[in-house]
Amino acid sequence: MNEPLYGMAVLRLAAAVADYPPLDGADATVEKRSPICGSRVVLTLRLDEQGRAAGIGIQAQACALGQAAATALARGIVGRSAEEVARVTADWSDYLSGTTEEVPDWPDLALLATGRNYPARHASLRLAFEAAPEAMAVALSENLKS
């Protein structure tokens, strides 16, 4: 938690978003924009037969924190249910807003914890996490129609 806002670990995490290119044949595609900072995330998602995340692609046009948060989401989402994704999204939002002192148990979020001290960056830090539950819901509803 003592990592600087844009420390080397955060910058590496931000650069790693390139490891998650958009998915062809995704079950859902969701775009989210932040009117506060102008960040934009396009998330593509594929589910497995049990309705859990099986693959993710992310296009992030955001500050390094937004890109790093998108990578953190991608690194932890595979194998997760819609309920787990919704829970971490709410927990991350609660942490950033100061409602709780506990960083959610999710890969790499502890590296981004210092972002809590910069409210102007919260929208970017939440963006990919807010897109994920919506993508899960779209994918699940599309699978039910099939």
Image: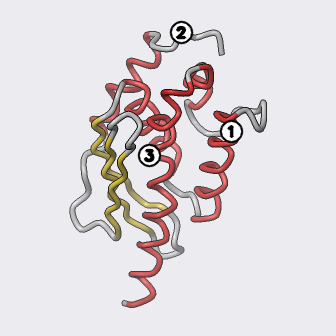
Where's residue 17, x and y in %? 33, 35
Q: Is residue 25 left or right of residue 16?
A: left
| Residue under pointer 1 | 104
Distance CA(mark 3)–CA(mark 2): 21 Å
Viewer-closest of 24 and 131: 131
- Residue type, numbered disc 1: Pro
Distance CA(mark 3)–CA(mark 1): 15 Å
The residue under the point 30% across, 40% down is 60
The residue under the point 52% across, 66% down is 52
Q: Is residue 137 above or below residue 114?
A: below
Nearer mark to the viewer, of 3 and 1: 3
Q: Residues within 10 Å of mark 3 (few under 14, many from 20)?
A: many
Between disc 1 and disc 2, whose residue precedes?
Answer: 2
| Residue under pointer 2 | 4
Viewer-closest of 13 and 120: 120
The residue under the point 47% across, 76% down is 140
Q: Is residue 124 left or right of residue 3?
A: left
Between disc 3 and disc 1, whose residue precedes?
Answer: 1
- Residue type, numbered disc 2: Pro
| Residue under pointer 3 | 128
Indicate the quadrant containing the N terminus: top left, top right, bottom left or bottom right. top right
Q: Residues within 10 Å of mark 2 (few under 14, many from 20)?
A: some
Q: Is residue 105 above or below residue 42?
A: above
